[in-house]
Image (cartoon, rainbow, N blue to C red):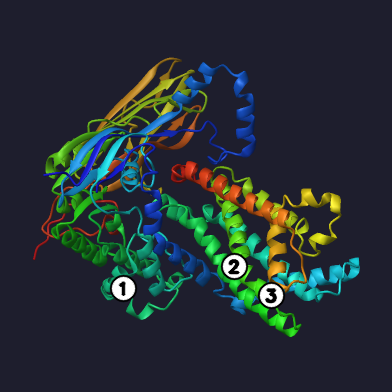
Amino acid sequence: MPLVLEPGRSAAHYWRDLWRYRELLSFLAWRDIAVRYKQTAIGVLWAVIRPALTLLVFVAFRRMAGLRQDIVPDVVLVLTAVLPWQFFSSALAEASTSLIGNTGLISKVYFPRLIIPLSAVATAIVDFAITLVMLGVVMAAYGVRPDIRVIALPIFIALCALLALGLGLLLAALTVTYRDFRYVVPFAIQLGLFVSPVAFETSQVPERWRALYALNPLVGIIDGFRWSLLGGRAAIDLTVLAGSVVVTLLSLVVGVWYFRRTERGFADAI
Amino acid sequence: MEPLLSVEGLGKRYRLRHRADDGGYATLRETIAGVLSAPFRGGNVTRAAAAADDFWALRDVNFDVAAGDVVGIIGRNGAGKSTLQKSLSRITEPTAGRVTLDGRVASLLEVGTGFHPELTGRENIFLNGAILGMTRQEIRRNFDSIVAFAEVERFLDTPVKRYSSGMYVRLAFAVAAHLEPDILVIDEVLAVGDAEFQKKSLGKMRDVSRGGRTVLFVSHNMAAVQALCSTALWLDRGKVAASGATPDVISKYLQGASPVDNASGRPRRLGRSIDIGRLTITPNPVGSGGAMDVAITLSAIEPVKIGEVAVLFYSSLETRVAVIDLRAANLPVRLDAGCEWTARATIASLNFVEGDYRVGLFVNSSDFAGDVLDLADLTVHARGHATVAPYAAAHRGFVELDVRIHA
């Protein structure tokens, strides 16, 4: 069947093309992973060291702030939140700069541009998988054993990836036109760490702020991680979770919509 | 026969920005300010201003390409060749018209697109192949042939950042040359590597075109277009100026219709008192070894004494190649305000090696003394000659000598 290129027609075969170019997606993700730790002395260990240091700081903080509780060892409690946070923040940061980091490709070759932020998120998933192994080791060392609820973990991982993807698509497309977002995103991520229940638990947030707090979609995701991993020693508020799901879906819809709407101009604007 | 590629009324418009100093990126502040202030501005005024800033890189372009055709696309810098290529390869969306493609298109705007310096040669073959649209099986099937063609067997597992630039380009071209699309769009890929490799790539291109593949070849290199393409298309300022059999189109192109005035069309001011009224080169483009006329007019804004004038020819790297000394053209001269000085010169045989040159002026006057660069571009084309294929222009210096070889 002949392919027709006309103003406004680029949508016609988009999703079919995206599927056809799936191999490129895996190649780009593989490239980013292969390149990431080249010419570093300790290589992939960096994927573990960064969350480990964050963990140390927050455990120390909890001790000083008197937030310590005895239900779950502090190290495990914080690590179950540092992991999804780190996953979310690196996926978002990389997705949002992915387009301007691949200017050469965008202005020289055709392929569905969605591939680029998708591969950035895929790269973050690989790093996350490594830290998940680290979490397993730490939990075993502290004798924390998850129960059947652990089968829900993939749902929360997917939720986290989709949220990062949705926001990442929106920010990546915005960054093509407005380089301002190069400065906004890292700052917003930094702030996000302090308004997410990483160093503390949602139950430690005062009751009357809880509804407002639940607007942060990461609250439901992080609570979900703790709930599924800590074998009933962490509670999850279903309304908070529902809020997270709604915000995630909303960001995905808005992200894909805006990305698709501006995509045809990327090569001209970048 | 149904054409494989059909272009009807194709147009591409770019919006030019007012401010050149911000590098072309909109900032959020400007957009917000623009949106907020829009209701307070007269609608008609803004629309008129926007229309004035439109630039049609392509306008009403029509042509068909049948399966197996090898079509050369020629034209001066900025004629719309790259925009056409980008439109055909789906990188930018057309503003008007329609392109119908009946097959897989692969486009090569630049060899080595997507090469990553940290990855090894082997890794880059796979990455680059995937980026150019090859499947994993296709790459694997062609892998040995790519490596052999690029002559990089020993360095396959070395990061390409340690490659010499020649090896890098060879590898990049080798991957591209093994693409197997129905329609291949390529741009100047032959202008890479050393003479030896160029010969090899030209041979490869010939094989590709003989193999029944449809090829669009975008090039400045008239010799290569002549050698490879059965038909040609000449783009001039976004429109098709001529199309048909290659020799006809090339000769029309070399006769070169539009003489180029100083680039902006505006007079350039020298000091306080002299305007460069006109600097005309005919024909432009010119065939190497052909005759060329240069005409120049300087006009005085205020009374001025002009002592010396020379037309300067520069290479694209700003090496001065030649000058036309105009002291013999009634100089020195004293001009009153509003008066003009004109000189004409004919070059019997412009023995420049083909390529793009720049034209400037040297002026020594009571008010201004010095060089002015970039008044016009001059494109020199190869004349088909000799029994031996010439080396690449980059290896032949600037001057074609009139040589007889006694064997």
Residue at x 56%, y 75% (from the top left corner): A39
- Distance of label 2 from label 1 (alpha carbons): 35 Å
Q: Which chain is mark 3 on?
A: A
Do discs 2 and 1 belong to a common subunit? no
Q: Which residue carries the number 2 mark?
A: A154
Pointer 2 or 3: first along the chain: 3
Residue A85 appears left or right of A162: right
Amino acid carrying label 2: it is Pro
Bin the neighbour count of mark 2 within 10 Å (Cα to Cα): few under 14, some 14-19, many 20 and up: few
Q: Are marks 1 and 3 in contact (CB under 8 Å)?
A: no
Measured as percent of width and height from the top left, residue B65 is found at 18, 44
Measured as percent of width and height from the top left, residue B26 is found at 57, 38
Q: Which residue carries the number 3 mark?
A: A49
Q: Which residue carries the number 1 mark?
A: B140
A8 up-or-down from B382: above or below: above
Residue furthest left as drawn? B407
Measured as percent of width and height from the top left, residue B20 is found at 53, 36
Can residue A109 be seen at all in this image of the molecule?
A: no
